[in-house]
Amino acid sequence: MTRLVCVLVIAACGSVDDKPMDTMPPSVVAIAPADGATGVWLHDPIRISFSEPVTPTSLTGVRILGPVGEPLPATAALEGDSVIVVQIDPAVAVVGSVRIELGEGVTDAAGNALGETSAGWTVSPWVHGPEVAGTTPAVAIGSDGRIAVAHTVLLPGGRRVAVRLWDGATWIELGGMLGTRDAALPSVVYGGSQPIVVWSELGTTPTIEAARWTGTEWQPIVSPGEGSFVVASALPGSEPVIAYTAPSAFGVGTVLRTKVLAGETWQPVGFDVAVNGGVVGLPQLALTGPARPAVAFVDARTVRTLTWNGAAWTEAPSIPLAPVPAGQFNRVAIAARGATVVLAYDTYEGSFGVHAVEITGTTVRPLGGALDVDPSANAQAPAVAIDADGAPLVAWRENIDGNWRGVLARWGATGWVSPGGHVWSGDPTRSLVRPAIALHRDRVPVVAWFESTDTVRVARFNGPGEAPLRTQRSSIVGCSFDGTAQTLSATGCFTIVNGTATPHAGLIPFDLRSELWSDGALKRRWLALPDGQMMKSPVTGAWDAPAGSMILKEFAIETTPGNSRTRRVMETRFLVLAAGTWRGYSFRWRADGKDADLLPDAPTTAPWPLDNGTQHVHSYPSRAQCARCHSASNGPLLGLRTAQLARRVDDNGVIVDQLAALQQLGVIGSQIGAGPPLGSPHDSTVPLELRVRGYLAANCSHCHNPLGERPTRDFRWETPLAQTMLCGPDNEVVKGNPAASMLFQRMSTRTGGMPPLATLQVDPIAIDVVSRWILSETNCD
């Protein structure tokens, strides 16, 4: 009995190793990003910290929901035993609110379930990192997602190279500055898990230098040798390859040389490529396989592309380039994925435009037409990548309405589209220069660039595939003009501050494919419709507007051409529909930019001083002259027609299809079927005949049509060439002989020339395009 009692006592007392039963559920200590955070990058890891260890099965209790509550594909993993790390699939792209929901599936070791918990944040289309001082950045992304940026830093003793890593919140500088004399134009790649940087050490005898980051310091790599203007590329798991310009081994001329890093030395890849006219700007490099470089560069007004197959260079047909203005040069970029090589470059046709081609061996296939948002604006400095789906992406800078914007386009089944629509930089106070692009996990674009303020910036993409369209039109109430207001500010249509006019919210911007020539003036255009009204929009011919509509146009110049910060407005013009008649009015801006004054009904001119000491003379038409062009014979609306508006536009930093956007705003009815878009004289991808026809339609068809002042010619876009009367016995066009062609003669002078109104200068772009068309013309019988 005593023994039994003892056992019972022991059982009742328990063991010294026993613990009280765990009945406390785990709780969330922190979520990063924090609940309510804005400006979040969707592809950064999400970390959820708990008050105690949780089980591996807890991962099933985590859900990520998109803006409309849709589940987003993601992976979850334990970090230690009390942190869950969630990674959203890199193919996902959304803008708006994103939420984490944690359910009872999250349990601790005792099986206690977490109560329902959620958190959310807002993701914007592009997320920008902090700025750093520097220029000419290059960007690379490691397999772990770390973003490395190498850039030049301007120091009193000369330029140096800095390399920084992005940790999700700040930039971490790796070691000290690199370079000893004048270090410039760096390129960065990942060699294994750590960055490798190469750069040009300029001076009396330029050399190429390189260094590898060990994790704690920069380890110099033996110099590849004498040369300059270097670029690097690397494939995962293989050593980097560099391409650079170097003096010829024969002591005469320049060659393009390629080398691969073998251990800690550089070994030749292929043989030197002779450069005929000297490389313009930086050469570019991509890899089709380990130690299989594809190089591209501008040489003697052509773009050359060569691919090394292991035994020889294969050169694709060169792409000719037109001369560029003094101080400017063409830029080229190249990317490869397997055997697919994509080349992006800019050309000059009165303005710079960006183009892309796919190269297979010796075959060059254009990828659509010009990528420009605005055919007449300067689009320059492309950077290119190819994503995991094999789709090329091109980033470039474009000057739209005096504002340098950073634009991205992706090639797909329907042509070029702007992913998400939102530009990656659109601050009007900044002037971005040259972008570089890399892809996070082979999908998500990351763009680095520098600005004229010697600032390096980086933007990472969140945005969806489709550009958002505005669904509501603001009321036009408060903006009106009946011909009596004496100042522009009195119309209520603009708020004027320091020479800049901000349009009324009810004004609808629009842009054209081919502009009316106005002596080089830069223009902005708006449509004002009565609330609740819409336009009739036929496939061909001018659109028809309801009573009370207005068309507004602004004319500006850059007092230093090419410098958007010197933009000055000279005139704002109104075209008003009242009592069934369109009437034109001009407001001349004051020299101080504080307002603009209504001009009397008489043609006049005014000089506007330029920064070089000369002046630009602007022509202000009379109201009768406005009526001559805006007549019923082919209008009276000249620009508002389907073929002119069939283009992409920048809607306050969002790139959208203009016709779709106008339909969404209720400006026009259901989406209309459009014929071929009007040819732009600036678009070199369009045949010369269509570029000429587009120019004549925009500048001449309001008079030269069957019911116009000059019915002997028909320059309407939809008129077949044979019916325009350009080809015939009266020497309007003499094939192969511009000087003998009446069309060229009339366009080449303003004394008895064409067009006869509101222009004092010959249009050099039109003269060039028309001349080249006549020289090559074969369709005129």
Image (spheres, rainbow, N blue to C red):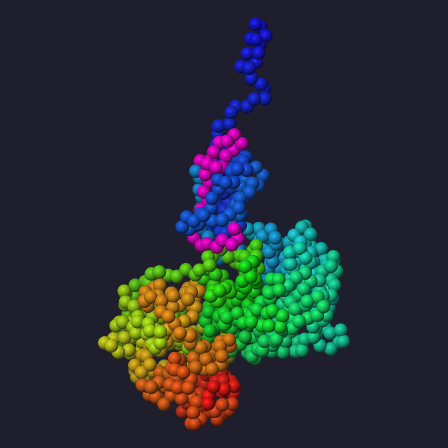
Image quadrant in which the N terminus is located: top right
In terms of image quadrants, where is residue 346?
bottom right
Identity of the residue furthest to the left in this view: 579
Identity of the residue furthest to the top in this view: 1
Question: Residue 434: x percent and y percent?
Answer: 56, 66
Left or right for 36, reference 203? left
Of 561 and 684, nearer the camera is 684
From this viewpoint, is residue 498 visible? no
Query: Looking at the picture, does residue 622 appear above or below residue 104?
Result: below
Left or right for 223, reference 392? right
Q: Is residue 636 magenta?
A: no
Of 352 and 206, nearer the camera is 352
Look at 32% across and 62% down and name the residue there: 474
The magenta segment is 89-115
Query: Looking at the picture, does residue 351 appear above or below residue 212?
Result: below
From this viewpoint, is residue 251 visible? yes
Query: Looking at the picture, does residue 464 appear above or below residue 649?
Result: above
Look at 36% across and 67% down and name the residue there: 671
Q: Is residue 99 magenta?
A: yes
Question: Residue 42: x percent and y percent?
Answer: 50, 51
In terms of image quadrants, where is residue 118?
top left
Look at 51% across and 25% down and name the residue there: 21
In terms of image quadrants, where is residue 254?
bottom right
Question: Residue 91: x percent and y percent?
Answer: 51, 54
Look at 75% across and 60% down and name the residue there: 265
Identity of the residue furthest to the right in this view: 250
Left or right for 664, reference 463? left
Question: Residue 581: x percent and y percent?
Answer: 26, 78
Magenta-drawn stretch, dominant element (helix, strand or loop): loop
